[in-house]
Image: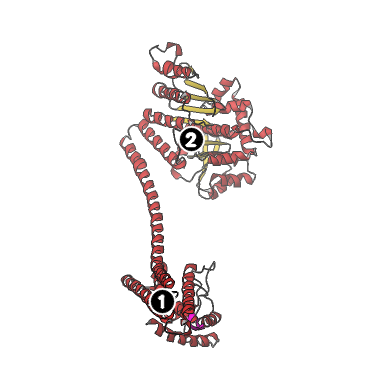
Amino acid sequence: MTRVLIVDDHRLFRSGVRAELGDSIEVVGEAEDVETAVKAIAEHRPDVVLLDVHMPGGGGQEVLRRVLGAGSQVRFLALSVSDAAEDVIGVIRGGARGYVTKNISGKELTDAIRRVAEGDAVFSPRLAGFVLDAFASSEAPSIDPELDSLTQREREVLRLIARGYAYKEIAKELFISVKTVETHVSSVLRKLQLSNRHELSRWATARRLV
Amino acid sequence: MPETSCTCDYGHVMADQKTLAEPTGDLPYRRMTRPMEGRLLGGVAQGLAAQLSLDPVVIRLMFVLLSVVDGVGVVAYAVLWMVTPRQPYAGQPPQRDWSQLAAFSAVGMALLAFGWLTGASKGGIGMLPFAVGGIGALILWQQADPERRKSWMSGATLSIRKNRVRTLIGVVLVVIGAIGFLAAQGELDQARPGLVFTIVVVGGLAVIAAPWLAGLWKELQLERRERIRQEERAEVAAMVHDSVLHTLTLIQRVAHDPREVARLARSQERELRNWLYQPAQDADATLAAAVRRIAAEEEDAHGVPIEVVCVGDIALDSAGKLGATLKAARQAMVNAAKYSESPSISVYAEVEGEEITIFVKDRGKGFDLETVPLDRMGIRESIIGRMERHGGVARVRTSPGEGTEVMLTMKVEKA
């Protein structure tokens, strides 16, 4: 049973998510802003925190900064109506292990929560597109070549995610196991979070569009 | 005449001020202070005006006149400035009212100059026209500042009447001053009257007109800003009304049809997003924008959500290669929306170097490509044929129950 905490400033949305999540997920608490979220995470110690990006008191990034900054191992899945590049890239670089938009179905959300709880990353097609776009302009000199570029295989995986393929379909397409697909995605997430490529942030800010 | 009463009051206060300056303990009067807000020099005239319940302009005028005539104004100002404590203020020290200071200085200088030219500063009768003209000019100038105007006058109806009276007095005084000067001048000096006449008349006119023009300009600016703000508000209101409210009404009316409700909500969401995040994107300028627009149109037409992801972008060419690719992509979306019965469609457009690739994928029922009748133009002609005619490639991957993916590839020379 995966224990989940929902952080969102819209009460209706919280109850909606609660109702939609499958039986394999237990909602241990809710929070509506940064303060209550930090407190609730410390109190309930959930496996996964469903984190809204825009919230009073600094938003999801502030929660990430305060919780992860304090050394917590809790995993975050960002959930937002916004799929603007700067929000997506910002919250992923802040430490979230995945990003899904709020129009996701209950089944898909349950699936994404399970994946994050197991330590994998969750990439929506749009996030995959952002990453491909951000890492595409590789002419700039990179400080750490390992972190600052994607391997051919990672690129292929991301492209298939962007095309709308599920992990299982990707595995079949590339003749690899689902576990390998997950490894590739996690590796991309690590690069996304750790890369010093300054154009990543610049790119996200410059691309203020959906 | 205000001057006379003012002068004697002034002397009275000077005396008061001297006693007040010494800490006598028992103060019969409110202590005079120099306000920093709205001061021209040191705030002396303002403080004095407040103490005497007079307009600061009268006091200032008096200082200017007294200074010009025999310099006593300067001395009086300096003494008062030294003995009067500054009024405490909060925060940043307020700025001087430089435009007014400039106006008073200009008038003072002009009076001095004319006095020197005519010898009137010795106290002769020739001084009077300048004094009168100066008073008129000052009243006019003073009056032009709307803030001050308000603070001077209490009672709205009174202020309007007073306003007109003031203007009239100002104009009359300027005219009298000019005529008087010329009359006096004509006897004194034959060499310069033409020049001085021009200066005086032009100066008088400028003094009369300048404040009004300045005020008018200020009001115009204010009005313009207000209009822009109102237009923005109206635009938001129109946006909310035309789209959001309209959609909400429609949703209530078709509440029995979940598919239509979802379509309406999605279409509204897209419109709102575009409005919020993509204020000025020309849908016909770049490939990504065009793909998004086509997807939006087909989504609206068929009620099936189409998710678009774009990587890289390219300006649309006129040669038609990209146009053909876009048309093929549209046909693929139409096919998927109409026949696949898929709950959603994924579109992925990528520009990598000189190669453009567009994928249109659904998770619908799929079909057997071999069994598509020859007369069905959709795939064979509108997608594969069109791409090949323009030098591109179209591949269709499908099988019954597996969904369909159309892949379009086109090479272009980048400009």
Q: Nearer the viewer, residue B178 or B357?
A: B178
Residue B411 located within the stretch drawn in magenta = no
Q: On the image, which quarter does residue B205 sit in?
A: bottom left
Q: Nearer the viewer, residue B336 or B255?
A: B336
- In the drawing, does residue A37 fall left or right of residue B205? right
Q: Position of residue B20 (x, y in %)?
A: 52, 86
Determine crowd level at label 1: few under 14, some 14-19, many 20+ residues with C-alpha closer than 10 A: many
Bounds of the magenta span? B68-73
Q: Which residue is mark 2?
A: A21
Q: Position of residue B224 (x, y in %)?
A: 39, 55
What's the chain of the residue with tag 1? B
Residue B72 located within the stretch drawn in magenta = yes
Q: Amino acid at mark 1?
A: Ile
Screen quadrant of the C terminus of chain B = top right
Magenta span dominant secondary structure: helix
The mark found on residue B135 in the picture is 1
Screen quadrant of the N terminus of chain B = bottom left
In the displayed structure, B148 sits above or below B297; it is below
In the displayed structure, B119 sits above or below A200; it is below
What's the chain of the residue with tag 2? A
In the displayed structure, B223 sits above or below B311; it is below
- In the drawing, does residue B247 fall left or right of residue A159? left
Q: Can you see residue A174? A: yes
Q: Amino acid at mark 2?
A: Leu
Q: Are marks 2 and 1 on the same chain?
A: no
